[in-house]
Amino acid sequence: HSTSPALSEKVEIIGASVSSSGVQATVLVPQGSSSVTIAALEVESTNGTLLCTASTSTTTVSPGTTTTITGSCSSGLPPVGTPVEVVVVTTSGVTASYQTTVS
């Protein structure tokens, strides 16, 4: 799902992984969107509870391109095999999520 407080900004996660070694999300900004600056990478339980905010550097993604965002969670991750949501948040508050399992 995605929300659009900034209507010109669109972002999708096309792949993600979560493990003890880190969190990774491949982010796509579709053509027609403005450039998007990713401010946060989060891991949530499937009921929406925030498990961790991965430390990551701010990354700007241009329309029509994909970028892989990586970060690390020092604690808060559930056991291997648990379904989780990886969420990216832009500086404008637009979010996108992707469901995966802890590996």
Image (cartoon, rainbow, N blue to C red):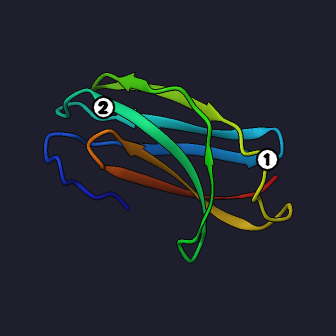
Quadrant of the rendered image containing residue 72: top right
Q: State the image coordinates of residue 28 (x, y, percent, origin top left).
A: 40, 35
Q: State the image coordinates of residue 92 (x, y, percent, origin top left).
A: 26, 43
Q: Residue at position x 72%, y 45% from top? A: 73
For residue 73, the mark is: none
* Badge 2 element: strand
In the depicted structure, whether residue 33 falls above or below residue 74: above
Q: Which residue is mark 2?
A: 36
Q: Give the side of residue 34 with respect to residue 103, left or right.
A: left
Q: State the image coordinates of residue 86 (x, y, percent, origin top left).
A: 57, 53
Q: Amino acid at mark 2?
A: Val
Quadrant of the rendered image containing residue 9: top left
Quadrant of the rendered image containing residue 78: bottom right
Dot placed on the residue nearer the N-terminal end, 1 or 2: 1
Q: Which residue is mark 1?
A: 19
Q: Residue at position x 19%, y 30% from top? A: 34
Q: Residue at position x 30%, y 31% from top? A: 36
Q: Amino acid at mark 1?
A: Ser
Q: Nearer the viewer, residue 27 or 36?
A: 36
| Pointer 2 local density, CA inside 10 Å: few below 14, some 14–19, many at least 20 | many
Q: Give the side of residue 93 with respect to residue 101, left or right.
A: left
